[in-house]
């Protein structure tokens, strides 16, 4: 059954990589999970995504997507801007795990 | 060089967000993994292909699908998508349907998986409405002049999927074989089968 799913799901006509980089898949999944568990309404997120696409037409799609997710979370108050900045700083200084 | 730095910065931002959300127990890492798995493997054009093949072989189902797709696809128990309202539009000898989202990238995920990259491209999003025949031709689909092209903009609460024309010579095919013939691009309307 799994073989068949893959055979039908990924023929050459559809043979495009789903995600170019792992972080893109994780960002997308975070948005889906947060909406599923009620952290925000999908419609709110989508409205911000439309705004982000509009405001940053030249940026790659998942960069727009990440910006929209950040904005949505800031709006809910679950995360503060300073938290993100601090964490980025910490991660940037951390030795690479891989 | 700048691009590399930017990419690195974006990656860090994504990572920062995830670690904060996990730390605050808003998310579990395993949930994120699960959703990725769902998108990469289980969801995909396969679900849409099953619906199309069923419509080709079961006229009563097809009738219901075209009348009220949202309700009709419930019997498949598809998971993993935010479909509020689904509308299925049928390609015929006289009409060809094309789906776009002019505002962002609304797409029937539960049926077609993730949108292809060109679907999110500003050029496709604007030109598909303005000059659909030319866009289709550039994508390799030359339609006869006599065929009317209808463009469906998913920007509202509605997601669209195209029911492609059944290919000639597939009269004897089983449901499973028919499912295998259906491509994602045909269900967006940028290809025929």
Image (cartoon, rainbow, N blue to C red):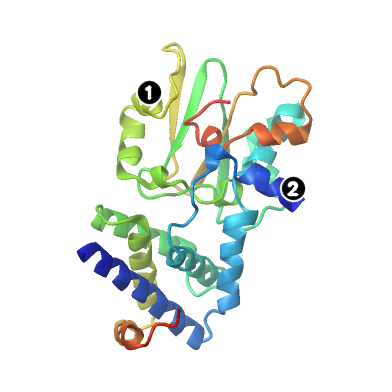
Q: Which residue is mark 1?
A: B133
How many angstroms separate mark 1 from mark 2 (CA)?
35 Å
Residue B116 to residue A87: above or below: above
Q: Position of residue B43 (x, y in %)?
A: 62, 53
Query: Which image quadrant is residue A44 in?
Result: bottom left
Asked whether the residues under marks 1 and 2 belong to the same chain, the reply is yes
Seen as rendered, the residue at the extreme front is: A98
Report the chain holding disc 1: B
Q: Residues within 10 Å of mark 1 (few under 14, many from 20)?
A: many
Q: Position of residue B166 (x, y in %)?
A: 65, 23
Q: Tell me the quadrant of the picture where the N terminus of chain B can be found.
A: bottom left
Q: Residues within 10 Å of mark 2 (few under 14, many from 20)?
A: few
What residue is at 72 percent from the left and 46 percent from the top? A4
What residue is at 58 percent from the left and 70 percent from the top? B33
Disc 2 is placed on an element classified as helix
The disc at residue B75 is 2
Q: Looking at the image, is mark 1 or mark 2 earlier in the sequence?
A: 2
Q: Position of residue B115 (x, y in %)?
A: 48, 48
What residue is at 52 percent from the left and 81 percent from the top? B26
With B110 as the anchor, is B149 left or right in this view?
left
């Amino acid at each position: 059954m799994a073989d068949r799913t893959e055979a039908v799901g990924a023929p050459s006509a559809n043979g495009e990589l789903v995600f170019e980089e792992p972080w893109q898949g994780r960002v997308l999944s975070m948005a889906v999970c947060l909406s599923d568990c009620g952290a925000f309404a999908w419609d709110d997120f989508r409205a911000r995504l439309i705004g982000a696409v509009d405001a940053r037409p030249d940026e790659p799609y998942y960069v727009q997507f990440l910006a929209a997710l950040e904005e949505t979370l800031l709006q809910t108050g679950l995360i503060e801007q300073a938290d993100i900045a601090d964490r980025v700083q910490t991660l940037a200084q951390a030795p690479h795990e891989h | 060089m700048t691009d590399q730095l930017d990419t690195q910065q974006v990656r860090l931002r994504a990572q920062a967000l995830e670690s904060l959300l996990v730390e605050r127990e808003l998310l579990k890492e395993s949930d994120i993994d699960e959703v990725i798995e769902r998108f990469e493997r289980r969801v995909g054009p396969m679900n849409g292909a099953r619906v199309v093949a069923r419509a080709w072989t079961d006229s009563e189902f097809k009738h219901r699908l075209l009348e009220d797709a949202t309700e009709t696809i419930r019997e498949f128990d598809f998971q993993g998508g935010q479909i509020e309202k689904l509308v299925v539009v049928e390609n015929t000898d006289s009409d060809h349907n094309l789906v776009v989202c002019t505002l962002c990238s609304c797409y029937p995920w539960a049926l077609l998986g993730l949108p292809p990259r060109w679907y999110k491209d500003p050029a496709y999003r604007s030109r598909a409405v303005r000059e659909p025949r030319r866009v289709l031709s550039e994508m390799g689909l030359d339609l006869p002049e006599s065929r009317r092209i209808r463009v469906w903009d998913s920007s509202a609460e509605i997601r669209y999927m195209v029911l492609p024309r059944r290919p000639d010579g597939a009269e004897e095919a089983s449901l499973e074989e028919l499912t295998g013939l259906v491509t994602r691009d045909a269900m967006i309307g940028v290809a025929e089968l």
